[in-house]
Amino acid sequence: MNFNETKIRVRYGETDQMGVVYHANYAVYFEVGRTEWLREFGLSYSAMEADGIMLPVISLNINYKNSARYDDRLKVITKLKKMPTASIEFDYELRNESDELLATGNTVLAFIDMKRNRPTRCPKYLLDKLQNYSL
């Protein structure tokens, strides 16, 4: 597996008066994709937080290509960009049902030790799960 594909339907509240998805919601769609990517490895943000690790976003980049609209069925394609160290980086594509590219994006998240409130290395259990991951 070298990517995760998550399906989302655009809800009315995510759009403006013209029925176009409000730009900030693309970041939310990427978060959904990232969360589902983690789930494929049997992990969750809540489990990592219970282990004392937070993953704040330290960088977000979105390139808008076409508009997503109310009631569109979207797919978020999430790919790990490189093996994690003290941070983890993802690339995204957002596509509609016709496979038209709507947006691309990238996020970098830092591994933070909650007790020390300091950056830390990627947990070994995540690295172990990524052992056979192909970039």
Image (cartoon, rainbow, N blue to C red):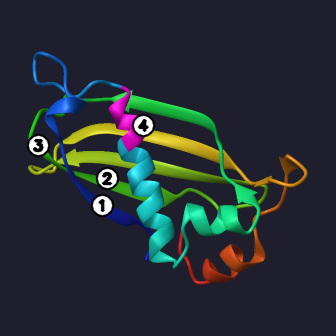
Q: Are marks 1 and 2 in contact (CB under 8 Å)?
A: yes
Q: Residue at x 38, y 27 (%)?
A: 24
Mark 3 is surrounded, within 10 Å at the Cα level, by few (under 14), some (14 to 19) or many (20 or more) other residues, namely some
Closer to the camera: disc 4 or disc 2?
4
Q: Do the residues labelled 3 and 4 touch (CB within 8 Å)?
A: no
Alpha-carbon span between mark 1 and mark 4: 14 Å
Say which of 103 and 29 sits in front.
29
Counting residues from the start of the chain, the first of labels 4 and 2 encountered is 4
Judge whether residue 66 can be spotted in this image. Answer: no
Task: Name the spot of residue 125 as percent of width and height, x first.
Answer: 71, 79
Return the mark for residue 72.
Answer: 3
Task: Name the spot of residue 14 as percent of width and height, x first.
Answer: 23, 31
Q: Quadrant of the C terminus?
A: bottom right
Circle 4 — which element?
Answer: helix
Q: Which residue is drawn at 16% across and 25% down?
A: 20
Alpha-carbon span between mark 3 and mark 4: 17 Å
Residue type indicated by callout 1: Thr
| Residue placed furthest toward the top | 17
Circle 1 — which element?
Answer: strand
Q: Would you say 36 lies left or right of 73 here?
A: right
What residue span does the magenta drawing correspond to?
Answer: 24-28
Task: Name the spot of residue 129 as percent of width and height, x first.
Answer: 62, 81
Question: According to the image, label 4 marks what residue?
Answer: 27
Return the mark for residue 49.
Answer: none
Alpha-carbon span between mark 4 and mark 2: 11 Å
Residue type indicated by callout 2: Val
Question: According to the image, label 1 marks what residue?
Answer: 6
Alpha-carbon span between mark 1 and mark 2: 5 Å
Return the mark for residue 76.
Answer: 2
